[in-house]
Image (cartoon, rainbow, N blue to C red):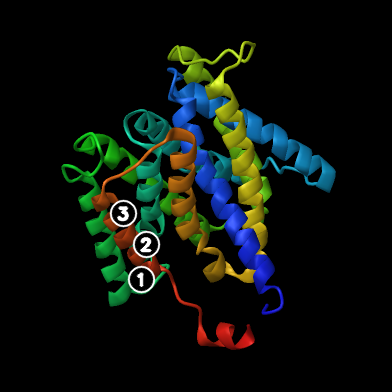
């Protein structure tokens, strides 16, 4: 692993930049009134089209047995439809950089869920990391955390609930597996099922987005974030296989930092000193909660 370490670090940085890029794109996508169900449908449709191309080039087939369909439905709901419904609405009310900071709670919330599912053992240091991260969240929602007064606590809570869905998704896969499917197959199948769910919801709620021209900045942002998500997810799966899950999990730090950078670049966002202190607490919390590699893994590396 050592000779490839610079290459792995480079890939890690690219992945963090790509995932962080999706946060300001989400803010732009909701900037002109698009509803969350319509955005979810087209996000999944664009991603599915790209994954269909990748699957065709690699000769990958999508199993459709009942147990596979069950998996697709569960992942579609807890990994996209429910969390994205919340995050798209929250993006209307919160700065993109703040959302990026709050999403760093995902690995911290994954820890108590893993304990509940008996996938992990209790550790005082990791509990301290969770508490430090929660302290960072409290600092964000305190009055004066942004330049325009207190942030809406309801939508901060919505983002944290989004984090809980993502954290549960990872633990669900760890606990019950993927029925022998590759990550690309799971993501592809879940995206197709998610389209079937989100399409009628978008149409029935009046949130359907007409794909015909003219197109504006929200449409371009939606396409860019959808493509980035598929490419980054595929790259992350590759990195986990090459460099291991502990090394790859460090992408969480970069996603948050790049999210702030892109929000500054594209949206001109800036924050009070208390937000940067909160970011420091959340980064410390991620570091403490992150599982440590076993001694034999380190020796092998």
Question: Which mark lies nearer to you, 3 or 1?
Answer: 3
Of the two numbered discs 3 and 1 on the same chain, state the one appearing first in sequence: 3
Residue 43: percent from left, percent from top: 57, 31
Q: Residue at x 30, y 75 (%)?
A: 125
Q: How many marks?
A: 3
The 10 Å Cα crowd at callout 2, few under 14, some 14 to 19, many 20 or more, is many
Q: Residue at x 65, y 66 (%)?
A: 8
Marks 2 and 1, how far apart at CA: 9 Å
Secondary structure under tag 1 reads helix
On the picture, is 251 further left or further right than 137? right
Q: Find residue 288 and name its label.
A: 1
Question: Which mark lies nearer to you, 2 or 1?
Answer: 2
Q: Residue at x 33, y 64 (%)?
A: 285
Q: Find residue 66 and name its label.
A: none
Q: Find residue 276 and name its label.
A: 3
> Between 190 and 10, which is closer to the camera in this rendering?
10
> Between 56 and 96, which is closer to the camera in this rendering?
96
Residue 255: percent from left, percent from top: 49, 52
Query: In this rendering, does residue 195 appear at all?
Result: no
Secondary structure under tag 3 reads helix
The 10 Å Cα crowd at callout 3, few under 14, some 14 to 19, many 20 or more, is some
Q: Specify the quadrant that holds the C terminus.
A: bottom right
Q: Are the residues at dot 2 and dot 1 in contact (C-beta closer than 8 Å)? A: no
Q: Specify the quadrant that holds the N terminus.
A: bottom right
Q: Is residue 186 above or below residue 122?
A: above
Marks 3 and 1, how far apart at CA: 18 Å
On the picture, is 74 further left or further right than 237? left
Marks 2 and 3, how far apart at CA: 11 Å
Q: Which residue is mark 2?
A: 283
């Amino acid at each position: 692993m050592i000779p490839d370490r610079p290459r792995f670090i480079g890939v890690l940085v690219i992945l963090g930049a790509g995932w962080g890029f999706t946060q300001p794109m989400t803010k732009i996508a909701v900037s002109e009134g698009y509803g969350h169900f319509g955005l979810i449908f087209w996000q999944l449709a664009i991603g599915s089209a790209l994954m269909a191309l990748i699957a065709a080039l690699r000769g990958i087939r999508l199993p459709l047995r009942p147990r596979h369909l069950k998996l697709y439905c569960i992942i579609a709901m807890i990994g996209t439809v429910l969390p994205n419904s919340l995050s798209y609405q929250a993006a209307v009310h919160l700065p993109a950089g703040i959302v990026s900071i709050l999403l760093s709670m995902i690995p911290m919330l994954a820890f108590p869920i893993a304990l509940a599912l008996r996938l992990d053992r209790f550790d005082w240091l990791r509990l301290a990391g969770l508490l430090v991260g929660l302290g960072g969240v409290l600092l964000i929602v305190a009055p004066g955390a942004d330049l325009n007064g207190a942030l809406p606590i309801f939508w901060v809570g919505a983002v944290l609930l989004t984090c809980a869905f993502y954290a549960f998704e990872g633990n669900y896969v760890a606990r019950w597996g993927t029925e022998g499917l590759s990550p690309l197959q799971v993501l592809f199948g879940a995206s197709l099922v998610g389209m079937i769910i989100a399409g009628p919801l978008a149409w029935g709620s009046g949130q359907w987005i007409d794909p015909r021209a003219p197109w504006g900045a929200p449409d371009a942002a939606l396409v860019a974030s959808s493509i980035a998500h598929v490419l980054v997810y595929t790259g992350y799966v590759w990195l986990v296989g090459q460099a291991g899950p502990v090394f790859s999990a460090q992408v969480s730090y970069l996603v948050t930092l790049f999210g702030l950078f892109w929000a500054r670049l594209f949206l001109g966002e800036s924050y009070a000193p208390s937000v940067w202190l909160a970011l420091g607490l959340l980064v410390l919390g991620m570091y403490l909660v992150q599982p440590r590699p076993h001694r034999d893994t380190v020796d092998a590396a």
